[in-house]
Image (cartoon, helix red, strand yellow):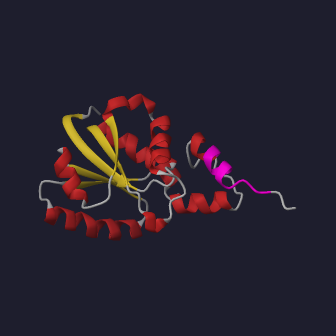
Amino acid sequence: MTPSANSVAVYPGTFDPITNGHLDILERSLAVFQKVIVTIAPNIRKNPLFTADERIGFIRDALPQYGARLEFEVFEGLLVEFCRSRGATVIVRGLRALADFEYEFQFAHMNRRLAPGVDTVFFMTDERNHYVSSSLVKEVAGLGGDVNGLVPAAVEAALRAKYARKPTP
């Protein structure tokens, strides 16, 4: 598939950390849209494990082949206003399960009401990633479990470093 000329989409999330499921959605988005702007929500309420700069770095490192077609911005506010300010006409979201659909359905309709020129496009996750979430990855890694194959190698190494077991005295 050839990306539509001058099409701009926004893929919002906390991405703390980015998973292979997120990367799958992002790559499939880049097959459809000329440019995808990844908005990183700082979301202090969620007590992020990685800084916004670290999260951006993980994504850049995992997808270097997309160069300038992939942009990043830390953003907190009304997503449709951000879309309008950047000329984006599409919000990209991934769906893993029925519960995701119900949640995303409400937001898609509200966003459409607020900005009729901005649509939401849903990508179903690949079946290999349908159960993977950033929260689950952090929980498994925090308990010493193996997250190989669920996240990019750089994220796996960073998780190991964050959750390194301190020797007991």
Position of residue 54 relative to residue 107, above or below, is: above
Query: What span is colored magenta in the figure?
Result: 157-166
> Where is residue 66 drawn, in percent x and y?
38, 31
Q: Residue at x 32, y 59 (%)?
A: 76
Residue 28, picture quadrant: top left
Q: Residue at x 50, y 64 (%)?
A: 47
Q: Is residue 59 visible?
A: yes
Front residue of 75 and 120? 75
Give the residue furthest to the front: 169
Q: Quadrant of the N terminus?
A: top left
> Where is residue 80 drawn, in percent x and y?
21, 57
> Where is residue 30 drawn, in percent x and y?
33, 38
Q: Residue at x 57, y 49 (%)?
A: 150
The reply, left or right, for residue 162 in relation to residue 55 is: right
The reply, left or right, for residue 53 in relation to residue 150 is: left
Q: Is residue 88 visible?
A: no
Residue 124, picture quadrant: bottom left
Position of residue 79 relative to residue 106, above or below, is: above
Q: Is residue 51 magenta?
A: no
Give the residue furthest to the left: 116
